[in-house]
Image (cartoon, grey):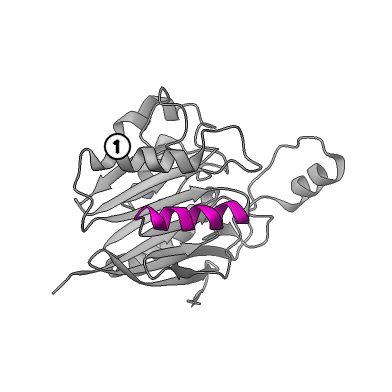
Amino acid sequence: MQNTYNVLFIGDIVGRPGRKTVEQFLAQKSSQYDFIIANVENASHGFGITKKNYDELMSYGINCMTSGNHIWDKKEILTYIDEQETLIRPYNYHKSIQGRGWNIFSDKFIVINLLGKTFMPPINCPFTALEEALNEISSEYELKDKIIIVDFHAEATAEKQCFAKFASSMGVNAVIGTHTHVQTADETIIDDKCAYITDVGFCGSQKGIIGMEYESSLKRLLTSINERFDIEDTPPYILNACELRFCGSAINDIKRIKFIYNKDEVCENEN
């Protein structure tokens, strides 16, 4: 009889409101999951992640932290990323860049992080990079019976959908989209073998603009002049995530999660 695995993927954590909401959710729910992944590239005031906040999130029971184009915004990342096997950065940066673009956990879960190209900073092709990553991984590990999950940090929905079909053909078990901070309602299983959602969403204040303060966001959009973004800290806070259920390495189900934390009261809506 094959083992079953419940995997939780938490959307982009934005600042202190995002971190505190993750803390509240995992205090109640972490025991339900065999493996927990979270995108942390916005965890420290919306841009990058400090070592202090990395340690804080580790204490909540997160097993793997993925990232994206903001991973380098806090320069102290360069002093500790090589030492933290839990934290991965997009694989399709130049190979000279510090950190790792994939890792294996508990000899079962392989997580790969990739950046999209469309409407994003210049980066190596994610399609070619996925092939390279899988070849690299297969030279070190037997892929049979492994669960391969890709965090595809990208802007364009068409690119995400096309990449997911491509990844499915390459034997990937789940492609979870991140970056836009807006949870999409298109969760599906491609060809009965690869779970997919265009964007898992974010964790932070519902009152803001994808976690940021409204006034600074509005000024930037009105004037087209770069404005310093500040975190919106007004509750209620939201956690967006998705739950993946596997039997052995075969995907059985993908389900969106929406969790609201209002400090005084907590409510939950699992879509």
Amino acid type of the residue that numbered disc 1 sits on in the rendered structure? Glu
Segment tinted magenta in the rendering: 158-171
Q: In terms of secondary structure, where does tag 1 sit?
A: helix
Identify which residue is drawn at 35% across, 34% down: 100
Residue 20 placed where, x, y %? Answer: 47, 56
Is residue 189 rendered to the left or right of residue 262?
Answer: left
Tell me, yes or no, whether the highlighted magenta stretch contains residue 150: no
- Left or right: where 147 falls relative to 22: left
Which residue ends up furthest to the top in the rendered image?
A: 96
Q: Position of residue 243 (x, y in %)?
A: 40, 68
* Residue under the point 47% across and 38% down: 49
In magenta segment, residue 160: yes
Percent x, y of residue 122: 60, 32
Relative to 104, is 51 on the left or the right?
Answer: right
Q: Residues within 10 Å of mark 1 (few under 14, many from 20)?
A: few
Which quadrant is the N terminus positioned in? Answer: bottom left
Which residue bears the numbered disc 1?
Answer: 136
With respect to residue 174, does 243 lie above or below?
below
Residue that protrudes farthest toward the right in the picture: 223
Please tell me which residue is depicted at 17% across the width and 71% down the height of the picture.
2
